[in-house]
Amino acid sequence: MYDKKSLKAEEFINHEEVLRTLDYAEKNKNNLELINEILEKARPTHVGRETFCKGLTHEEASVLLACEDKGILQKIYDLAQEIKESFYGQRIVIFAPLYLSNYCVNGCVYCPYHNQNHHIPRKKLTQEEVKAEVIALQDMGHKRLAIESGEDPVNNPIEYILECINTIYSIKHKNGAIRRVNVNIAATTVENYRKLKEAGIGTYILFQETYHKESYEKLHPTGPKHNYAYHTEAMDRAMEGGIDDVGLGVLFGLERYKYEFAALLMHAEHLEAVHGVGPHTISVPRVKKADDIDPNAFDNGIDDETFAKIVALTRIAVPYTGIIISTRETQTVREKLLQLGVSQVSGASRTSVGGYTEEERPVETEQFDVSDQRTLDEVVRWLMERGHIPSFCTACYREGRTGDRFMSLCKTGQIQNCCQPNALITLKEFLMDYASEETKKIGEEFIKKELDKIQGVNEAVYKALTNNLKEIENGKRDFRF
């Protein structure tokens, strides 16, 4: 039985409810009257300086996904862009993954780290190697990381993860500092989530891979990850453990995309119903080539147009969430998706253990093929040239604006009063400390134009921000609104 308030995986992600939803969507995919009503419901409303969005249910969003009308598709794209700009403006957060260990006891058939892969070199970073990786990332200009690790209770116990987090936060190199560590590790216990919270993590991220239980169990034939319920219920345990910002995601290509999309939104609705806080982020990776993984072996791959539609509808259905697109995707794909709802991107990523200290990108231990291989400087310049504000901001976490406190600001659009100035502050730091001369020149002009937009609209913010930017030029760092 479907019950979004249940704490049982097969009730809040109910197979029969997903099938019913897909049947309803198929029957109504040409019902233009209903479709336009759904689009109108999702449109932002503005009251003074506040913006409100109702979002969509999994059923409503699935109808839009099923619709193949080209005119409706354009309306979907336009609305997604409007909603994204209402809540996040032109700000794009930048981060990098840091792989700690590729030891893993699971048998996931889509990941080269699976325990049956006996020819991939296995590696686990020592604390000195963690330090070297972090310094390399700081020297690029990164301020926030997402740490990644295989599941192995012997090689990668929670104590190792906690030690790595402590090491990362302790390193201050020149003007560099990692100000926020997000964590993407296997489902664990409430007690361990409490330990992660106490270590000062940002968001706890866990990809579901697929919500289709039968497929999930086949794709995870061995290891603790085989337990569908334990994995799917992890976010509830994380929140019970005090982590109030969690990140969802599916790996598109493993199962039928319409099924995954509906179930993903059901998971978001569940978190909102039970905890009062939906997902802080939603990631949308697609299966990619890796060491012994051929993406063509999975028969549910989606083309770029379908992928773009999924991203746009995710933004419309869950307007407040941060949508993440990684370097799995090409520059061309990422560029399009930035207009359709994406608000976070990785930059200069290396998906191998110890990859950042190598002069050449090591490919033999990569978790997946990196399609966008540009430097961080090139990514920052690219974003500005297309009108986006590259942001290395971590202020909300350090100011206590997390969970329901963040969402209360985000759901009214008020978070932009913090986000835009914080983005410009961290961009200024990057320009002063790490940027090439070309990027710095473009960046200084870009900041000036953004300041002109703020002046006259919010004079207090303009004055404070102008002063902060001057202080950064004088050598001070880490201002935040």
Image: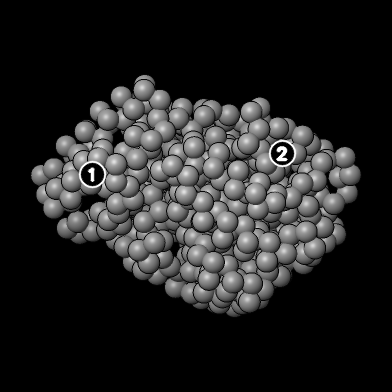
Visible in this render: residue 42?
yes
Q: Residue at x 86, y 45 (%)?
A: 117
Image quarter of residue 238? bottom right
Horizontal arrangement in the rendering, residue 452 relative to residue 294 (left or right): left
Q: Nearer the viewer, residue 110 or 211?
A: 110
According to the picture, the residue beneath numbered tag 1 turns out to be 471
Q: Which quadrant would the C terminus be assigned to in this image?
A: bottom left
Badge 2: residue crowd in 10 Å (few <14, some 14–19, many ≥20): many
The label on residue 398 is none
Visible in this render: residue 385?
no
Amino acid of disc 1: Glu
Q: Which quadrant would the N terminus be assigned to in this image?
A: bottom right
Location of residue 113 with respect to 262 vertically, above or below: above
Horizontal arrangement in the rendering, residue 79 relative to residue 269 (left or right): left
Q: Secondary structure at mark 1?
A: helix
Q: Percent from the top left, x then y, of residue 350? A: 62, 38
What colour-coding does the image apply? one colour
The span from disc 1 to disc 2 (Cα, nearest Å) is: 41 Å
Q: Residue at x 56, y 45 (%)?
A: 134
The label on residue 366 is 2
For marks 1 and 2, the one nearer the N-term is: 2
Q: How many marks?
A: 2
Q: Percent from the top left, x then y, of residue 452? A: 16, 37
Q: Percent from the top left, x then y, of residue 325? A: 53, 42
Badge 1: residue crowd in 10 Å (few <14, some 14–19, many ≥20): few
Contact, CB < 8 Å: mark 1 with mark 2? no
Q: Nearer the viewer, mark 1 or mark 2?
A: 1
Q: Residue at x 64, y 68 (%)?
A: 234
Q: Residue at x 57, y 64 (%)?
A: 267
Horizontal arrangement in the rendering, residue 115 relative to residue 346 (left or right): right
Amino acid of disc 2: Glu
Q: Secondary structure at mark 2?
A: loop
